[in-house]
């Protein structure tokens, strides 16, 4: 039996399969990105001069988790809508600027498997501002034109200023700092 | 079979560039916000450059072997920046932008109104920011000064810790404006706190019979320190006579609250403001 | 043949229209009659029917026919009769509609009758009920309603000097620097709270004071918590509170939890919310001649007169009362809307019902008046 190996045809089929595989891969990963829960632990023992009330603690946990879910969605989908509600002032402006320039550049960022260890270090006497330090671990993935160009597990340190809004705590400043 | 495996490996590497190992770029360890930065590259040919940071997501084409120039305006926001240079593989590097020197304050003072003579009633928090609105985390000394009229009430120098400096003190003894100033070198931020009278003290009323009933009014209403209670404060007059009770919630106007009450019989009038009670007044029946 | 269908359609339509006139008339006549037996009859040969005719005409605003059912011996004229039923001066009545009524004869002789009517009004503040007694007399072979003289407040022309006092609020723009324009919310405090079971469910009530020197818009929320620490329900004081509190002013509040029993409640979480609002210190409304009496139905009712001491018309006034027991504890909070406008320097009576279970324990009470004037905040 004389079998002729049609390399071109095989390559085309192979490429198709590869595209399907890559697409599936991307779909699974992006679905994972959208669904992956943001883990946040909060330690308020060092907060001063005011002790953090238990209701406030719950609010901070809820709203900080929501804020990072919003960041992840906004950067993954290049959507400004996700940034409504969780941010105020400079933080909101900077995040909006980031999404807008991502839209222009055409690439996206994903923050996967987020784990935040949050520590309240300053809580103003009147309870109108709280400074928190976040040691965040996540997988940062940058995708350009469907192609992953960077994927890295990172440990970051953030200084966060949160202020009470009408019905939630909002992030007013989110600034990454080198590990001291 | 080997050819099949080889092709699979080629396809896999095309589909999953994760396999490209990031190599260090020579990026600066730390940059001050707003400063220009140059990043040297090696090699030859074209590559795609990515700058991923707070407020910036830049993608551009660069020539390997030439320096990549980052303008200061791309580095206004303090935080971490990721640099990627991709040709066949992607090389990456990260650096931090730190805040420049303080150029302004966020100065939060509470409360905006405070009753006089209360301990630990006035507090303030200052956060120094640089000219790009980055929080300055390097310790600096902030000076807080409180003055009522021209009289200094409180002064304190506080070194910032984690970017925050704060104070807390008692309110003054007299109603009026309290100026609160935070300063750092030639920078300063001013806020005002209204010191108001405390609860009324020795609330006293006088009254007289008029054709339609009784007219009652307070003496000028003061707090226990002698400050005039603000106009608009509600004073409740209650008149009790044999066949019923009448009440009027009257605002203080020009220091005095006044009400007319329909009452014909012998009447006992009492007065209260909030939870503070005043004297009772007995007025005889209409002749 | 081709004309049969159109002709039959026209005939059927006409027949239905004629039928509709009769059936429609009957349907309208039953509006407001709980028993559903009233029909407008041109000739009222009994007292109850005569009164129902009158009220049906009032509902339809058929003033001429309504007035024809009023006895000539009544001391009323067309203008004041219409004003009595439709309201004036932007009062609550002028925004209300008579939705229905139920009548019950109290006393009937061959020539005279006394009938009690429960009037159901649809108003912007919810359904309101009004109980009125009507006297009817036989005039020939028809019954007619005798209406008492309607007292329309007559305010003489005058100048009333007012030292006007109000608080305006200047809010900062969006571009304001963080912290540069802090104006604190007013400081308010709940000074008493009591939770009781009532026939309708659990009730949380008490009093709140504005301790600040600026006006406050206040709302009180309560959350009922069970023994496991979970929230059973949370509600707000809605309109059972004087929302705008001037400095040092005290208001009752009441929060209703329908169909919830306190047996299942371990604790109550209270939350008062206050925001700064522009407000005026005027008008001042005095609450005169307050006394608790039994009404014609034997219910305990707090009566009094609202006296507008200012020079401007108060369109809608809302009376809220806290009732105390002999330990000065708030045991009930009740409210009522005044459906007549309060003209300057004039009075209007008000009445607030006290539940039977509470009435014997009431030792004292505190009345506050919330007011709304058209064209003012």
Image: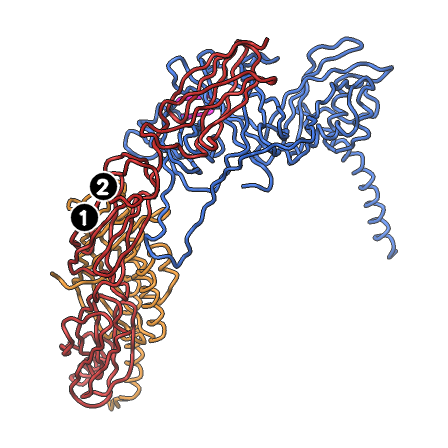
B239 or B208: nearer the eye?
B208
**Colouring convention used in this rendered image of the protein:** by chain
Residue at label 2? B169
Q: Main secondary structure of the magenta part?
A: strand
Q: Position of residue B139 (x, y in %)?
A: 15, 58
Residue C34 is covered by the magenta coloring: no
Output the letter for the chain in red. Answer: B
Residue at label 1? B156
Output the letter for the chain in blue. Answer: C
Q: Position of residue B44 (x, y in %)?
A: 19, 90
Output the letter for the chain in orange. Answer: A
In the visual, does C176 lie left or right of B181? right
The chain identifier of the residue carrying mark 2 reads B
The chain identifier of the residue carrying mark 1 reads B
Which residue range is magenta in the image?
Answer: C196-206
| Secondary structure at numbered mark 2 | strand
Residue C201 is covered by the magenta coloring: yes
Quarter of the image that includes the C terminus of chain C = top right
What residue appears at the point 53 percent right and 14 percent down from the top-left corner? C291
C232 or C145: nearer the eye?
C145
């Amino acid at each position: 039996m004389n079998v002729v190996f049609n390399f071109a045809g095989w390559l085309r089929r192979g490429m198709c399969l590869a595209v399907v595989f890559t697409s599936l891969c991307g779909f699974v990963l992006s679905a994972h990105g959208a669904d992956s829960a943001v883990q946040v632990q909060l330690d308020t023992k060092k907060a001063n001069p005011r002790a953090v009330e238990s209701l406030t603690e719950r609010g901070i946990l809820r709203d900080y988790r929501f804020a990072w879910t919003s960041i992840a969605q906004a950067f993954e989908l290049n959507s400004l809508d996700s940034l409504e509600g969780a941010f105020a002032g400079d933080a909101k402006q900077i995040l909006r600027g980031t999404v807008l320039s991502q839209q222009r550049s055409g690439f996206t960022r994903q923050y996967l498997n987020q784990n935040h260890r949050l520590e309240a270090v300053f809580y103003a006497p009147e309870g109108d501002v709280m400074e928190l330090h976040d040691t965040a671990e996540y997988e940062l993935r940058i995708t350009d034109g469907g192609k992953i160009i960077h994927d890295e597990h990172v440990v970051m340190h953030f200084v966060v200023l949160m202020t009470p809004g009408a019905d939630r705590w909002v992030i007013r400043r989110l600034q990454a700092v080198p590990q001291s | 079979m080997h050819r099949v495996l080889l092709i699979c490996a080629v396809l896999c590497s095309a589909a999953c560039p994760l396999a490209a190992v990031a190599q260090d770029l020579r990026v600066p360890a730390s940059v001050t916000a707003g400063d220009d930065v140059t990043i040297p590259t090696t090699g030859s040919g074209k590559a795609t450059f990515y700058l991923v940071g707070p407020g910036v997501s830049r993608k551009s084409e660069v020539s390997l072997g030439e320096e990549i120039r980052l303008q200061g305006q791309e580095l206004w926001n303090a935080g971490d920046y990721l640099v990627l240079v991709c040709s066949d593989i992607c090389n990456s590097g990260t650096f931090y932008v730190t805040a420049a020197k303080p150029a302004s304050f966020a100065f939060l003072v509470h409360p905006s109104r405070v009753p006089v003579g209360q301990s630990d009633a006035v507090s303030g928090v200052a956060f120094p920011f640089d000219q790009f609105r980055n929080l300055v985390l390097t310790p600096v000394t902030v000076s807080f000064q409180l003055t009522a009229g021209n009289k200094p009430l409180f002064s304190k120098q506080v070194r910032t810790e984690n970017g925050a400096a704060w104070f807390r003190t008692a309110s003054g003894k007299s109603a009026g404006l309290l100026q609160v100033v935070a300063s750092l070198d030639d920078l300063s931020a001013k806020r005002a706190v209204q010191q108001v009278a405390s609860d009324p003290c020795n609330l006293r009323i006088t009254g007289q019979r008029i054709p339609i009933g009784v007219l009652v009014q307070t003496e000028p209403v003061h707090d226990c320190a002698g400050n005039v209670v603000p106009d608009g404060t509600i004073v409740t007059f209650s008149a009790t006579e044999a066949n019923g009770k009448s009440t009027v919630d009257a605002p203080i106007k020009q220091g005095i609250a006044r009400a007319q009450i329909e009452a014909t019989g012998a009447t006992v009038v009492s007065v209260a403001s909030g939870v503070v009670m005043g004297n009772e007044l007995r007025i005889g029946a209409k002749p | 043949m081709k004309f049969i269908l159109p002709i039959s359609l026209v005939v059927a339509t006409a027949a239905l229209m004629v039928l509709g006139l009769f059936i429609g008339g009957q349907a309208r006549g039953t509006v407001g009659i709980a028993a559903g037996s009233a029909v407008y009859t041109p000739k009222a040969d009994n007292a109850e029917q005569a009164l129902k005719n009158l009220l049906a005409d009032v509902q339809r605003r058929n003033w001429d026919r309504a007035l024809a059912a009023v006895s000539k011996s009544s001391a009323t004229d067309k203008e004041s009769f219409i004003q009595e039923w439709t309201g004036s001066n932007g009062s609550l009545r002028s925004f209300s509609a008579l939705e229905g009524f139920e009548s019950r004869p109290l006393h009937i002789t061959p020539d005279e009758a006394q009938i009690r009517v429960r009037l159901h009004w649809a108003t912007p503040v919810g359904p309101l009920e009004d109980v009125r007694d009507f006297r009817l007399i036989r005039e020939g072979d028809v019954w007619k309603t005798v209406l008492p003289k309607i007292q329309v407040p007559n305010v003489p022309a005058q100048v009333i000097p007012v030292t006007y006092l109000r608080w305006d609020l200047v809010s900062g723009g969006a571009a304001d620097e963080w912290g540069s324009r802090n104006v604190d919310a007013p400081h308010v405090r709940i000074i008493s709270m009591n939770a009781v079971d009532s026939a309708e469910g659990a009730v949380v009530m008490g009093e709140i004071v504005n301790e600040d020197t600026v006006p406050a818009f206040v709302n009180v929320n309560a959350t009922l918590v069970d023994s496991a620490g979970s929230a059973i329900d949370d509600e707000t004081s809605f309109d059972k509170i004087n929302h705008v509190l001037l400095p040092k002013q005290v208001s009752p509040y009441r929060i209703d939890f329908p169909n919830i029993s306190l047996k299942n409640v371990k604790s109550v979480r209270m939350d008062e919310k206050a925001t700064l609002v522009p407000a005026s210190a005027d008008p001042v409304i005095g609450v005169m001649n307050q006394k608790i009496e039994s009404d014609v139905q034997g219910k305990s009712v707090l009566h009094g007169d609202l006296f507008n001491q200012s020079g401007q018309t108060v369109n809608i006034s809302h009376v809220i009362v806290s009732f105390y027991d002999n330990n000065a504890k708030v045991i009930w909070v009740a409210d009522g809307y005044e459906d007549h406008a309060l003209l300057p320097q004039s009075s209007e009576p008000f009445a607030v019902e006290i539940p039977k279970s509470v009435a014997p324990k009431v030792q004292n009470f505190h009345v506050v008046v919330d007011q709304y004037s058209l064209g003012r905040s």
